[in-house]
Image (cartoon, rainbow, N blue to C red):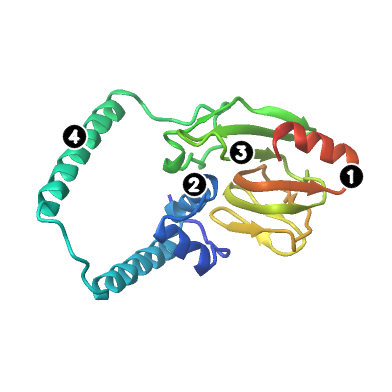
Amino acid sequence: MRPPDIHHHPADELLLSLAAGTLPTGIRLVTEIHLELCAACRERVAMLRAVGGALIEEESAAPMRDDALAQAFARIDAMDTIEAAAGAQAAAVPRKVPAPPPLPTGAVWPRALADCSATRWRWIGPGMRWSKVSVPGAPQANVFLLRIGPGKYLPPHTHRGTELTQVIYGRFHDGRALFGPGDFDLADGEVHHQPVVQEGSECICVAAVDGRLHFDGFIARWFGSLVGM
């Protein structure tokens, strides 16, 4: 399948935080999904990690205990055992995102979601459905899938925190730009927008919210609070 033409990417600051391992779970997950689809950002993160490793090597060496090397090898052996067990379990159990119904032809679930679980598609309005994603070991992560029909739209809103959106299928325009398959968007309290799905096909996105969306209307705010937006 031909890679998507990607026009919107995470900022360098976000990629640097990903490389350093400091992102909250939900934000990290959506950013990693973008990397699956975007070779340019994968190369960018690899470069940032290489630069970080070089900086660490230039730091002055710290005194080490006499048994430090033995302890390091012991930890490596333990990690190998854990990874081997996890690999055997993964090979025995098919990995998929349990979020029916199936995706449209040509769309696939990102590998980063393989260990997650997802609810069934739930109705939130005419032509609009959502699915809550549960991330192992991170019950606080607010990650969900959105599936919105052509010509439909979310209510106008801003953000009390940060919203990351990764497009899996279809296109939407939010008044700032057009976002298509593979595109990534980060919106915060300075962004007020209304994503509108373009005619021709539905749009499916993975989103993570650190905080809450703040919808303009009372009814939209009430409904958003029910679904965790």
Q: Earlier in the sequence, mark 2 or mark 4?
A: 2
**Residue 96 position in % (x across, y down):** 43, 30
x then y, percent, for residue 35: 44, 55
Q: Residue 61, percent across and down?
A: 21, 70
* Residue on which disc 3 sits: 145
Q: Earlier in the sequence, mark 1 or mark 2?
A: 2
Q: Quadrant of the C terminus?
A: top right
Asked if the residue at tag 2 contacts the one at tag 3, i.e. Cβ–Cβ closer than 8 Å, the answer is no
Q: CA distance from mark 1 to mark 4?
A: 53 Å
Residue at which label 2 appears: 29
Residue labelled with disc 1:
217
Residue depth check, mark 3 versus mark 4: number of the one nearer the observer: 4
Q: Earlier in the sequence, mark 3 or mark 2?
A: 2
Closer to the chain start, of discs 3 and 4, is 4
Residue 64, horizontal then vertical, whole percent: 16, 60
Q: Amino acid at mark 3?
A: Leu
The residues bearing labels 1 and 2 have C-alpha atoms spaced at a distance of 30 Å
- Three-letter amino acid code of the residue under disc 1: Gly
Identify the element where label 4 is drawn: helix
